[in-house]
Every structure is written in structure tokens, then in C-alpha cells.
Amino acid sequence: MSGGDKIIPAVNELIRAFEKAGLPVFFTRDWHPSNHVSFRVKGGPGPPRSIRHHPGACDNPSLVLPADAKVIDKGTAQAKDAYSGFQGTDLAQKLHRLHVKQIYVAGLATDYCVKNTVLDGTAQGFETYVITDCVKGVNLKRADSATALRTMLSRGARQTTSGRLAKSLGLRRVVPHPS
């Protein structure tokens, strides 16, 4: 996705702030089998991507992944796609076990995985925030990300920015990403 890497500096600053505050950090990732249903060759909409154990399937190398980060793999079933970090995973159980009440969502793509993770987080009873300057959409149609954000907010999610969140965590600044 063009420009998706622009959110990484602010996301890295927030990860450091969460670590400093002793808060858990979770990462979700697509971890598809090589014959995943979402691939064009299988009748899906897109090219092969995020194929488990293949180069390029993991996160961007400039993203700081803490040693104790919890990685949640999604989209692991060959015949089923998963846009939400909660879909087909044990994310909700892990968050509940840690007595997490609020979740903050950053990443790609606003109009797909972010939207679905935020909606499912809200439905699971978490106070769910989308960090608006730490998400980036695919925008097949120009307004897709804006429409996704409106949908998230209309269903109970809240929005914040990396700067506001960092301040609430006691961090003075966060590297803003250019719009």
C-alpha cells in the first residue's frame, strides 16, 4: 500500500510509551497459507500477500516489535478470510485475561482490517479507540477511509491521535506522520 510506512514513526513512539507505562502491546498480522481464498488465483480479489514463512510476510523492518509483544495471527485458514484481529483468534480472551478495558488500534488498512478490528473490539465490550493519524487506508474509492471512520464512530468507537494518547501516557511528543 502506497504511503503505509509513513505511520511507522508515530506507531513506534506509541509502542515505546506503552512499554514504558507497562501496558501490553499486541500486533495482528495476516498469516495466510499459500493457497488462501483471498488470492486472485483462488478466485479472490487480490494478489498473494502475507504468506506465512515467506520473505516479506512479516512486518516492515522499521517497525519496532518489542520482545514481549503478543502476535496474533489471522487469516490462517485456507478457505476463510479475516479482516478483524478478533476473527478466528483468541485476541479477546487474551485481552480479558489481562483485564484490559481499553484498546487503541493503529495500522493498515483503515477501510479493512482497522475498521473490522475496531468494530469487533467495540462489540466485545472494549472501549475502543482508533488512532486517526496512525492508520492508512487502501481507498479503492477516495472516501473509503472517511466512510470507515464514520462507521466506527457511529458504532461506539472513539477517535484519538498519537499526540493525545502519548500525552495521556506521559510522553512529551510523538513524531507526527505527514498527511
Image (spheres, rainbow, N blue to C red):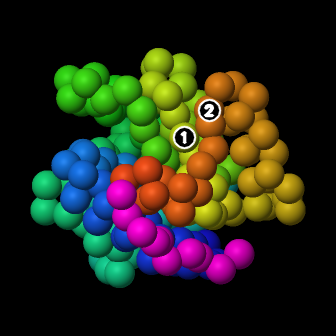
SS under mark 2: loop
Report the number of discs: 2
SS under mark 1: strand
Residue 68 position within the rendered picture, expressed as x and y whole percent measured from the top left: 14, 55
Q: Residue at x 67, y 61 (%)?
A: 137
Amino acid type, label 1: Tyr
Query: Magenta segment range?
Result: 170-179
Dividing the image into 4 quarters, which one contains the C terminus?
bottom right
Can residue 79 be seen at all in this image of the molecule? no
Q: Residue at x 47, y 18 (%)?
A: 125
Which numbered tag is attached to residue 39? none
Amino acid type, label 2: Ala
**Residue 83 is inside the magenta segment:** no
Comparing 147 with 14, the one in front is: 14
Can residue 61 be seen at all in this image of the molecule? yes
The residue that mark 1 highlights is 129
**Residue 173 is inside the magenta segment:** yes
Vertical side of 54 occupied by 145: above or below: above
Which numbered tag is attached to residue 157? 2
- Mark 2 neighbour class, 10 Å CA radius: few under 14, some 14 to 19, many 20 or more: many
